Amino acid sequence: MAPMQPNWDIFCRVIDNYGDIGVCWRLARQLANEHGRRVRLWVDDLHSLQPLCPETDVALAVQACRGVEIRHWVEPVAVDRVGEVIIEAFGCDLPASVVAGMARKSPRPCWINLEYLTAEAWAEGCHGMASPHPSLPLVKYFYFPGFSPASGGLLRERGLLAARDAEMARLPRSEGLDVSMFCYESAPVGELLDLLARSPTAVRLHVAPGQPLAAVAARFGGSGPWRRGELTVIPFDFLPQDDFDRLLWRCDINFVRGEDSFVRAQWAARPFVWQAYRQADEAHMAKLRAFLAQYVAGLGAAGAAAAVDLFQAWNSGHGLGRAWESFLAARPEIAQHNRHWAERLAGHPDLAAALVKFCAGKV
Ligand code: TRH
């Protein structure tokens, strides 16, 4: 049977980095592959998608990949089809021609503004809120991802945790620590490197390209790989999105950032440290505190303090040395807690399934 609302259009404007397209690409694939939707992903910068999905041909205006039709979003957009669901990712401002096409379509499409992830309480209050268009007969709904059942959920593919567990069961035992690092340039990377070099056991630090690798090069000079004391720094090339997930599954501790890698580290259920995307007026610190308040709730006092201190130190640049020591001491407790945390989150509907249901309710 054909699904309700078979045609979906997702519009993504890349602001910077990989988070906007990272979220949209995952969502598009999941809607197509798990929910049988015909999905068109409109992206204004194919060069940002290509590292996540190496099959992408940046020269093509239209191409099919992993069950998704990818369209290079170049204005003006000629409207040949208006989907039953239109997703405006992160308030990216739909093309005027598309909005006009939506107003002409009957029944009207379901218009979703997919928002950024935050654990702040106000987001739950705004989740699902309707915003009527000032002049056209259209309503836009705000859709907030989040960590509680009152939110729009988190992206989680079917079978993800089973695939993770199968991969983890195959991992050979290794001595020392594998740590991955994906962070912004403002993180106190140099200080972390010094701490890791003085570690009592071997540490293999897997460093993402771009800002993380530049921060390491700024400390050590040259282009790596580097060895300092017990530390070996292993730069890696940008990985296709699913391979990046696997790297997080393999590492003992993951430093992640932004939005999408932050969520993937939680599905990896390994100890992790999050650097929030910097916002004006330190708004990201409120985001950080809101997440920590929910996340550490099930941890004992020492584990909770260790996680809070390290997240704060990594984001503020202050107090990393002591926080790192406490985090390492609490690592077994945090590892166990993160398994429970991931299981708890996986008990809620995933974002794609919840969104399909939400949109069906707006017909
Ligand atoms: O790249 P990010 O910092 O992205 C963003 C954007 O800056 C965005 O504008 C901002 O609003 C948002 O953060 C909060 O971090 P993020 O969200 O983790 O996205 C990175 C994506 O890249 C994610 O999908 C994982 C993927 N990735 C790979 O697929 N392979 C890799 O090797 C690496 C390092 C990342």
Image: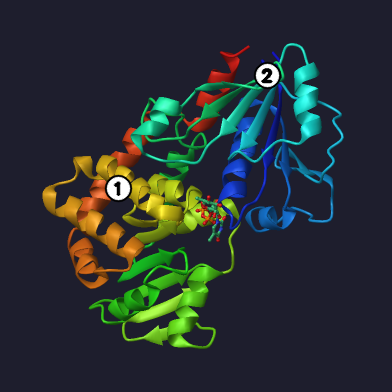
Q: Residue at x 59, y 32 (%)?
A: 113
Among the 4 quarters of the image, the one containing residue 356: top right
Among the 4 quarters of the image, the one containing residue 249: bottom left
The image shows residue 92 at horizontal and vertical percentages of 65, 41
Task: Indicate whether 352 appears above or below 186.
Answer: above
Q: Quadrant of ligand 1?
A: bottom right
Asked whether residue 202 is in view, the answer is no
For mark 2, what is the residue? 138
The image shows residue 19 at horizontal and vertical percentages of 55, 51
Furthest-left residue in this view: 301
Label 2 C-beta lies within 8 Å of the nearest ligand 1 atom: no
Q: Nearer the viewer, residue 321 or 96?
A: 96
For mark 1, what is the residue? 289
Label 1 sits on what residue type?
Answer: Arg
Label 2 sits on what residue type?
Answer: Leu
Left or right: 89 as drawn, with respect to 171: right
Q: Earlier in the sequence, mark 2 or mark 1?
A: 2
The image shows residue 183 at horizontal and vertical percentages of 45, 63
Please identify the quadrant where the N terminus is shown: top right
Q: Residues within 10 Å of mark 1 (few under 14, many from 20)?
A: some
